[in-house]
Image: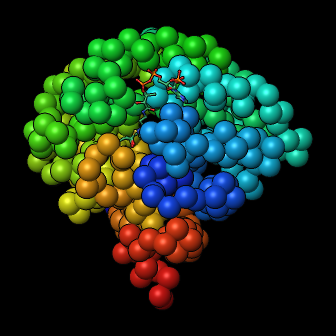
Amino acid sequence: GLADHVRIIEVGPRDGLQNEKTSISVETKVELVRRLAGTGLETIEAGSFSHPKWVPQMAASDRVLSSTLTNPPASSHPITYQWLLPNSKGLDSFFKVMHNVPPATDGYPTPPPSPQHESSSASTPGVGSKVSESNKRNGNNHEVSIFMAATESFSKKNTNCSIQESLDRFAPLMAESRRQGFPVRAYISVALGCPFEGPDTDPHKVADLAVKLLEMGADEISVADTTGMGTAPATKQLLRTLKDAGVRNDDIAMHFHDTFGQALINTMVSLDHGIRAFDSAVGGLGGCPYSPGATGNVATEDLVYTLHSLGAKTGVDLDEMSRIGGWITSEIGKENGSSAGKATLSR
Ligand code: HMG
Ligand code: MG
């Protein structure tokens, strides 16, 4: 068996909801985050500070953030909340809330520094963060997520700039975020296929970006199969290329969309390669507004079921996660996208 701990990054409240056409109330979003925090998860991407005209569903993320600060969800251990942003304007909006909302007084104990950060800053100068106390609220951590693309067409569509402009834009943003004590996760989109350039994204391009982002100070790279076109051989080749470029497994999380039903197979390939962090969305929610036809992230319930079957520890309660998947999908009028979730609920 696989006795290791595997970290799940729940992106349902962000990636899962950003693409929904029907408007979802802030109360529902806050309630989703609150319920997820009670499942044993360690990391939740809870919202995004993009342009509300382009991503209207995330417009109330400032209110979701302030709610996690003033009324932190109960959890058995500290939670890392991640907030996606496309540019410095998004960072300003994030800081505006962080700086102006005082933490609740009845919080949780401050967690010890995460061993991952300690080891990465110790072993690789310039990589990994010195996490200051300023990002800790009620014992929980807050981090920002940025995103860029491995192809020029997707970069243009998603962020209205070239890959190089994107790097230039994010360099000062990352420096400022880390200076203020907020670690930065960086997504590389279309790493295993692009809706505009086809399935054969150059893995060297992905590796090159990963190295640059780590040199710029990214604390974690989320390698994203935005379109779900990734296959087992392509995933294997991409991970080998990343390794050859000097990117360590500890610096990587994999982000699989399940459009072609390959997410769990690609997860197995990644586990074999030594990856121990995966993004997923409860109920299989999700999709990217700029990736036509792409469906949800791999369902958290399915991922948990597979990982537990291998003997891995996730800390996540499958029954509770399945109830949340059933609740949120019916709440927003979608089919439950998790096989393991539906099966668990009907037991
Ligand atoms: P732009 O039009 O080039 O931006 O858009 P701009 O800098 O020229 O500004 C235009 C206007 O937008 C200005 O307002 C700005 O103030 C405003 P005006 O002066 O005209 O009144 N503005 C903003 N307002 C609020 N929040 C902001 C912001 N930025 C500018 N942050 C931009 C460029 C990047 C802003 C736009 O293209 C955008 O918002 N894109 C968001 C794309 C997005 O959120 N995509 C989904 C998330 S990524 C994803 O899902 C992939 C992932 O899951 C991994 C994977 O699966 O691949 C992470
Ligand atoms: Mg995504």
Q: Is residue 158 visible to the viewer in this orientation of the structure?
A: yes
Residue at 69% across, 50% down: 77
Where is residue 148? Give x, y as percent: 34, 28
Q: From what the image shows, is residue 236 above or below residue 214?
A: below
Q: From what the image shows, is residue 40 above or below residue 290?
A: below
Residue at 84% across, 33% down: 102
Residue 29 in the figure: left or right of residue 154: right
Q: Is residue 131 visible to the viewer in this orientation of the structure?
A: no
Q: Quadrant of ligand 1?
A: top left
Where is residue 241? Give x, y as percent: 17, 30
Number of labels in the image equals 0
The picture quadrant where one finds residue 21 is bottom left
Q: From what the image shows, is residue 114 above or below residue 235?
A: above
Residue at 88% across, 46% down: 106
The picture quadrant where one finds residue 82 is top right
Residue 181 in the figure: left or right of residue 240: right
Of residues 205 and 292, which is closer to you in this image? 292
